[in-house]
Structure formats: structure tokens, C-alpha cells
Amino acid sequence: MEFTPEIKKATQPIYQKISKTIPEIEWSIHAPYIYEINKLKKKKNAVILAHNYQTPEIYHGISDFSADSLALAVEAAKTRADIIVMCGVHFMAETAKLMSPNKKVLLPDMMAGCSLSSSITGEDVKELKKQNPGVPVVSYVNTSADVKAETDVCCTSANAVKIVNSLGVKKVIFLPDDYLAKYVASQTDVEIISWKGTCEVHEKFNDAEINEIRKNNPGIKVIAHPECPPEVINASDFTGSTSGMIKYVKDNQPEKVMMVTECSMSDNVQVDNPNVKFIRPCNLCPHMKRITLPKILDCLKNETNEILMSDEIIEKARKSVERMAEIGR
Ligand code: 13P
Ligand code: SF4
């Protein structure tokens, strides 16, 4: 696509915002897509929801709403748009469909999965329930709709402890992230039965790396996502969902910060916090990175890659997400 003077002028305000993150030569490739997508989404009454791990040209260039998984689910329920384009991974698009079953939900790349979500099936949950009769199931939103359909209540990293405590029981089955389960167990008296799922991005971090960075950067604040291994959480100053981490930086304006999570977050947050120096450990989520501007334009133009599920699964799975939203309210 051609980077015409008209496109250059129309996209200039966006580029001014992110020019420190994206070199001019790269912008000339992104800008024509950004221009077309922004025009088309208005014409089609589409909304673009983007997870915090999307690249800066998506996060700052075309998204109408960027957030963590919890806020994306809430926004999907509220939107008046006819089409939702989910710039995130498959379970996020499925969750959007559960919350807005009458809307057309599109995912620019159907292969954008998640190692947590693929670690467990609905059948596995049925088996766990058989082994632990009467014990409620709390599932992380990073699960398929089939798993959610077998779940009593969903949670995200932002509200996991609150959800577990709200049930008023002695024991819960908590799926599928073993590290998040350990984090929740450290914050509650409820006994946790966990599953052996891990996030392939966050499990790569370790405390030795953090200690080394602290040694070389005195005074640095280290903030970690709860999908990290326990030793990383213990070595950090703050733990929170992706939006919780962004809020920490915004509110505290640390001189230096290391966000122990997916790389693109630091790029995105840097734009709105120019006085904070980001020390970037770089682990990319290969699934999130499948979403690109050309794929977004293609799926919006042709309305391809629609998320479809049976009414039965939608009904059952939606209840677990709605229950989460009710408890959160
Ligand atoms: P958040 O809910 O914190 O945005 O996390 C989702 C995710 O996939 C993190 O790896
Ligand atoms: Fe899944 Fe981890 Fe990627 Fe998040 S970062 S989508 S948990 S694989």
C-alpha cells in the first residue's frame, strides 16, 4: 500500500504520539493500513478492542479501547458496535462473543492461541469435578469456552483473589495456571486445587535476572504479572494484571521500572509516561504477535474469521463470566 501525502497528513497526529517508539521508515509501512482500518471501522460501525500486549501501531494507531482481559470482556458487553474486532488471542475473542452473542466477533488470526488456554479441555474439567465432588471451579479467563462452560465462576489476574474469597467455601478448584493458583493461595486461606498450566511467556522469567537488573539499576521498581513463577513475584515490588501494572507506572511515575511481562507493554506504556525509564526484559507472546495490521484490515474488509459457537456453549460459558462480573461489581 502506498504512503501518499494525504495519508501522511491524516495519520500525522497518531505518529507524533508514537514517533519515539516507531522509526519513520517503519511508519511509512504502517500508516496506509492505519488510515484504511480507521476509515473502514467507521463505515462498518465496528469497534477495535486491543489487549495491552498488542504492538504500538495497533495499540495507539487503530484501537478504540485497549485494556487487560477483564476490561476487554466488560467493554465487549457494553459496545453498541455491530462488529467487534478482537486484537488479542482466541480466548479473548470467544469471551467477547459470550458477552455479546448477537454481535459479529472477528479475530484477525484464528491461530492466535494461548499456552494456558490450550493446557486444559472441558473434558479435563468434568474429570476434575468427578474427583472433587461439590468443590466449585474457578477458571482464569485464559480458557476456552468449553472449559468456561464447565466452570462456576471465571476470574482474571485482576480479581482472582477476590473471586476465590467471595465463594465462602473451604476449597476451590482453580484452573489452569499453576503459578497464578500459587499466588492466589498465598493471599487466601481457601485451599486451592490447581492444574499444571503455565504461560509460556511468563514462565521464562527468573529471580536471578531480576536481582542482576536491580544490582545494575539501583532504586528501580520491578513490577510483575501474576502468571510469573512465585520466585519472580517474591522478587518484585508489585504484582498486578496488565492494566494494574500500567496504573502502577502512571500513579507512581518511578524513575526506572522493569515490567516483568510481555515486551510490547513497555513500548505502549512508555508513550504515555515519557519521564519513566523502562528497563526491558524481552519475552514476546508469539500468539499476540500473530495479530498484524494487514490481517486486521483483511478480516474487517471481508468479515472473515468470525467466532462461532453453539447456543448451548454460549449460554453455559456466559454464566461463569457474568458471575465474575457480578462479584466484581
Ligand atoms: P491480563 O488479564 O492481566 O491482561 O492478562 C492476560 C494475559 O494473557 C497475560 O498473559
Ligand atoms: Fe497466553 Fe501467556 Fe500469551 Fe498471555 S502471554 S496470551 S497467558 S501465552
Image (cartoon, rainbow, N blue to C red):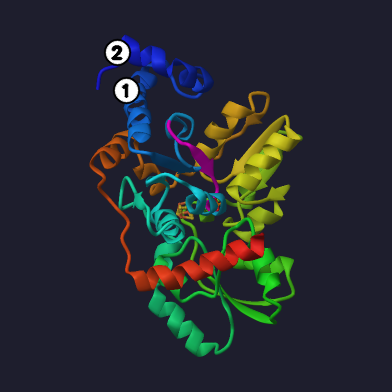
Residue on which the image places disc 1: 32
Residue at 54% across / 39% down in the picture? 265
Q: Relative to 179, does residue 30 appear above or below in the rendering?
A: above
Residue drawn where x is 46% and y is 42% of the image:
50
- Disc 1 element: helix
Q: How many marks?
A: 2
Could you say which disc has been placed on residue 4 in the image?
2
Distance from label 1 to label 2 (Cα)? 8 Å
Which residue is painted at 44% across and 47% down in the image? 285
Residue 219's x, y, as percent? 76, 35
The reply to whether the magenta stretch includes residue 66 is yes
Q: Quadrant of residue 234?
A: bottom right
Q: Is mark 1 within 8 Å of ligand 2?
A: no
**Residue 107 covered by magenta stretch:** no
- Magenta-highlighted residues: 62-69
Quarter of the rendering containing residue 1: top left
Tell me which amino acid carries mark 1: Pro
Residue nearest the viewer, comparing 185 with 292: 292
